[in-house]
């Protein structure tokens, strides 16, 4: 089920290739505007400080235990309670000299020292610091062309990999092909190795996916796949479609490697999920997805979780599998929830569901928004992974929705945005077992950008090693003020002093 080559006659995919993304139906937006903000200000005056002080007496969790990982393991950091929840800016970058075209920023990663951004045909690294006073990049890695696919994964020692569309002459017949993969050290910006993917003439920004796991980088593009050793860049295995009607449509990495296998074409497409041996590409087990499913996403490889669109274009159910056998454990209806697996169409979204997070034995999913303005905007439900039952719930507040950012041991780190100037936005750690919440950071985002940066449709939200980051997926100039820089990313850390 190849999406085919980009329609653009240009080697850059940025406008005509991605034009369809601009017309994609967005979810319901809030329309209450200033009325909501004013009402929230009256209702919640002083509530931020009251909430913090009350939570401070019952922190509700023990700091996650840090487990020593191998350098090439996919990172699983344990977050600690900051010295103070009072937030301050630790990194910020405003993109200047934007043309009338949209500049896409598909990748955002953070280490303890660097916030890295893949923007168009480069990756920039910005120093994270408590005395932020410059948005100049600490390093810039110029690429051979625009980034086509990114992984959400980062190794324990701060590396990741991206797929690039090298610039080529139109007459070459490969001007839109994404067949270059490279490994990057995020702390230094050093390119560790670079390879040309074999037989990847049909790899495009619309169908290429990349994942990292257990010392392996794996890439799939519908009509083929390839895997490389993470350290050396040596090719481990690769496949081409040949005469087979089934092909790897994408991978989920992390603690294991899952493959989404597509069979057939168009309306007759069927799916199965396979757990692969990363070093050989051989299937350990297979799970056949029922016929009639429109699409499948892989939000977690271990524990294995599938998000399926059954008879619809949006996700209708989550399916959990046994990690050892691949047997189905539970099916969880998403009729009241919003897992956000359909954000965009490009840059390798098989394994990215922004409205949910998966822990060792819990799945956290945000609900759909409530239309009653007197009630909490939405909530997050924790589901038992093996039974599929709801076991805990965390409510947002009126005009203050919440969504999951990442797990932290058995806890969940979530972001709660705000629509008023009084009560701050917050990063919160929530224990579904005790119901207790611990504030990590309290802050306000820049007023003109807060709405876009708090919307997972438009921005990536990360929390890593005590810092919260908000990064736009697309950078477009203001036509009214075309020379003004556009906020690309902002990071917040604790304002507390170490003793």
Image (spheres, helix red, strand yellow):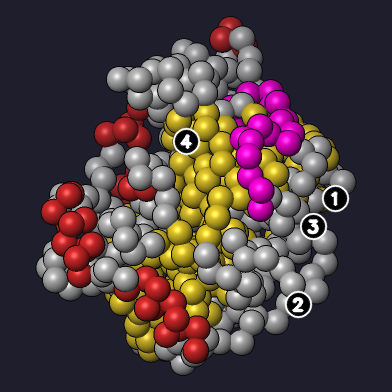
Locate residue 41, reporting x and y percent.
23, 62
Q: Main secondary structure of the magenta part?
A: loop
Among the two numbered marks 1 and 4 on one chain, the one whose residue lies closer to the N terminus? 1
Among the two numbered marks 4 and 2 on one chain, the one whose residue lies closer to the N terminus? 2
Residue under the image location 49 percent in, 89 percent down: 57
Residue under the image location 68 percent in, 34 percent down: 137
14 over 452 or under it: above or below: above
Q: How far apart are marks 4 and 3 (CA)?
A: 29 Å
> Which residue position holds label 2?
67
304 over 132 or under it: above or below: below
Numbered badge on residue 487: 4
Helix, strand or loop at mark 2: loop
> Which residue position holds label 1?
231
Left or right, 170 with reference to 283: left
Q: Distance between the residues labelled 4 and 2?
A: 36 Å
- Mark 2 crowd level (few <14, some 14–19, many ≥20, 10 Å Cα): few
Locate residue 129, reporting x and y percent.
68, 50
Q: Nearer the viewer, residue 199 or 468?
A: 468
State the image quarter where residue 498 is shown.
bottom right
Left or right, 264 with reference to 191: left
> Which residue position holds label 3?
157
Among the two numbered marks 1 and 3 on one chain, the one whose residue lies closer to the N terminus? 3
Nearer the observer: mark 1 or 3; the answer is: 3
Q: Are marks 4 and 2 in contact (CB under 8 Å)?
A: no
Range of magenta residues: 130-149
Q: Nearer the viewer, residue 436 or 355?
A: 436
Furthest toward the top, the residue is 171
Q: Distance between the residues labelled 1 and 3?
A: 12 Å
Q: How far apart are marks 3 and 2 (CA)?
A: 14 Å
């Amino acid at each position: 089920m190849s999406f085919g080559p980009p329609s653009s006659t240009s080697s850059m995919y940025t406008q005509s290739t991605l034009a369809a993304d601009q017309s994609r139906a967005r979810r319901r937006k809030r329309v209450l505007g200033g009325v909501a903000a004013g009402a929230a200000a009256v209702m919640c005056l002083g509530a931020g400080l009251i909430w913090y002080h009350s939570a401070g007496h019952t922190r509700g969790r023990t700091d996650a235990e840090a487990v020593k990982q191998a350098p090439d393991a996919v990172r699983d950091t344990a977050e600690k309670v900051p010295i103070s929840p009072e937030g301050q800016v630790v990194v910020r970058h405003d993109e200047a000299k934007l043309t009338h075209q949209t500049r896409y920023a598909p990748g955002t990663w953070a280490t303890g020292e660097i916030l890295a951004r893949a923007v168009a045909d480069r990756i920039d690294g910005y120093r994270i610091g408590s005395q932020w006073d410059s948005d100049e990049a600490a390093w810039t890695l110029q690429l051979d062309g625009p980034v086509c696919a990114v992984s959400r994964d980062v190794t324990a020692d701060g590396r990741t990999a991206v797929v690039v569309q090298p610039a080529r002459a139109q007459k070459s017949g490969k001007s839109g092909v994404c067949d270059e993969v490279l490994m990057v050290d995020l702390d230094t910006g050093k390119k560790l190795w670079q390879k040309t993917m074999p037989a990847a003439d049909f790899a495009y920004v619309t169908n290429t996916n990349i994942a990292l796991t257990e010392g392996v980088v794996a890439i799939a593009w519908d009509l083929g796949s390839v895997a490389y050793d993470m350290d050396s860049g040596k090719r481990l295995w690769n496949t081409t479609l040949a005469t087979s009607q089934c092909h790897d449509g994408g991978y989920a990495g992390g603690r294991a490697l899952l493959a989404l296998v597509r069979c057939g074409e168009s309306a007759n497409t069927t799916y199965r999920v396979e757990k692969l041996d990363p070093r050989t590409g051989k299937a350990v087990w297979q799970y056949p997805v029922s016929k009639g499913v429109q699409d499948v996403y892989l939000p977690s490889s271990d524990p294995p979780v599938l998000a399926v669109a059954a008879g619809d274009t949006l996700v209708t159910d989550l399916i959990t599998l046994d990690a050892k056998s691949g047997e189905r454990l539970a099916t969880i209806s998403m009729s009241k929830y919003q897992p956000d697996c359909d954000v965009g169409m490009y840059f390798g979204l098989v394994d990215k569901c922004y409205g949910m997070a998966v822990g060792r034995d819990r799945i956290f999913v945000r609900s759909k928004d409530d239309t009653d303005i007197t009630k909490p905007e939405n909530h997050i439900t924790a589901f038992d992974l093996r039974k599929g039952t709801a076991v805990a719930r965390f409510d947002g507040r009126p005009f203050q929705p919440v969504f999951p950012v990442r797990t932290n041991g058995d806890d969940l780190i979530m972001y709660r945005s705000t629509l008023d100037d009084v009560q701050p936005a917050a990063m919160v750690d929530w224990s579904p077992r005790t119901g207790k919440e611990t504030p990590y950071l309290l802050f306000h985002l820049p007023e003109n950008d807060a709405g876009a940066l708090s919307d997972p449709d438009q921005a990536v939200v990360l929390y890593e090693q005590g810092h919260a980051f908000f990064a736009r997926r697309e950078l477009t100039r203001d036509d009214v003020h075309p020379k003004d820089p556009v906020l690309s990313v902002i990071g917040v850390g604790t304002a507390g002093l170490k003793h």
